[in-house]
Structures are given as C-alpha cells and as structure tokens.
Amino acid sequence: MRFFLAIVVGYLVFGISAVLLFQLAHVDPHQQPGVGFMIGSTIYGIVFACAGGYTAASIAGKKELVNAGILAGIIALLALISILAQPGLPSYWSQLAAVIFMAPAAVVGGWIRARGVEAKRRMLEQT
C-alpha cells in the first residue's frame, strides 16, 4: 500500500505542478510556444519531476531508486501515450521534454533521497 501511495503522491507533485504552470501561463502544452517558455517550462518540469522522485522515495521508505524509477517510467509512458493518442497535434515539445529530461530527473530525485538516507545511516553507525 505504501509503495502505491508513494508513486501516486510523487506523480501528483509532478503532474499538478505542470497543470498549474500551463493554466496560469495560459499556454496550450500541445501548441508551439516561444522558445523562452519552452526552456523555462522544461527546467520547471525537471525541478518538479526531481521533487516527485524525491517524494516517492521518501514515502516508500525503502528501495528509493526503485520507486523513483517506476515514477520515471510512468512519466515517460504517459507522455508517449499522449503523443500516440493525438497524432495530429502541431507540437509534441512538452511530451518529448517529459521523456528526455523530466523522467530521468525523477530518478535523480530518488537518488538524492537514497544518498541522504545512506549518509544518515553511516553517520549513526559512527556515533
């Protein structure tokens, strides 16, 4: 149960942040925006994907990289499904950015959490 909760909450951290960005900026993620918005929103997505991976790893409590990796797979899979489900869209930039940059960032978030847990464990062993 905790495993599934970790994945769901991690995805919500990523997904809700993306919805909010596009809603607040009044930008259609399936249209071609300006280069500045594309770069900024990709960096924003990377940050929140990393936070989602960290969150999933934290909630799970064990196997941090496994949870973050599953979250990354879900991010990439949903982006690919979006591309395949809507083949006539004029632009796939946000979905491609999710696959290429954001999904790996989720794993990085889990890795950061795992490193922190390991460092804490070593510090406790030394005392």
Image (cartoon, grey):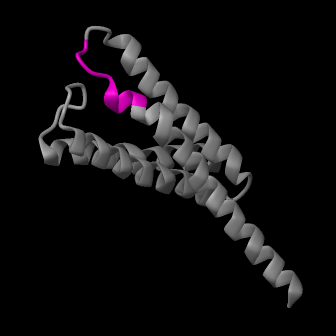
Q: Residue furthest front?
A: 35
Left/right of residue 26 with respect to residue 63 in the rendered view: left
Q: Which residues are magenta?
A: 89-96
Residue at coordinates 56% horizontally, 42% vertically from top-left? 104
Q: Residue furthest left?
A: 26
Q: Residue furthest right?
A: 126
Q: Residue 112: which quarter of the image?
A: bottom right
Can you give x and y, in whole percent of width and height, for residue 98 in the image? Answer: 43, 35
Q: Residue 39: which quarter of the image?
A: top left
Q: Is residue 101 above or below residue 17?
A: above
Q: Is residue 5 visible?
A: no
Q: Give the position of the N terminus as an image quadrant.
A: top right
Q: Is residue 50 above or below residue 69?
A: below
Q: Is residue 95 magenta?
A: yes
Q: Give the position of the C terminus as an image quadrant.
A: bottom right
Left/right of residue 126 with respect to residue 18 in the rendered view: right
Residue at coordinates 29% horizontally, 49% vertically from top-left? 40
Left/right of residue 85 with respect to residue 70 in the rendered view: left
Can you give x and y, in whole percent of width and height, for residue 20 in the image? Answer: 24, 47
Marks counted in the figure total 0
Q: Is residue 31 above or below residue 88?
A: below
Q: Residue furthest bottom?
A: 127
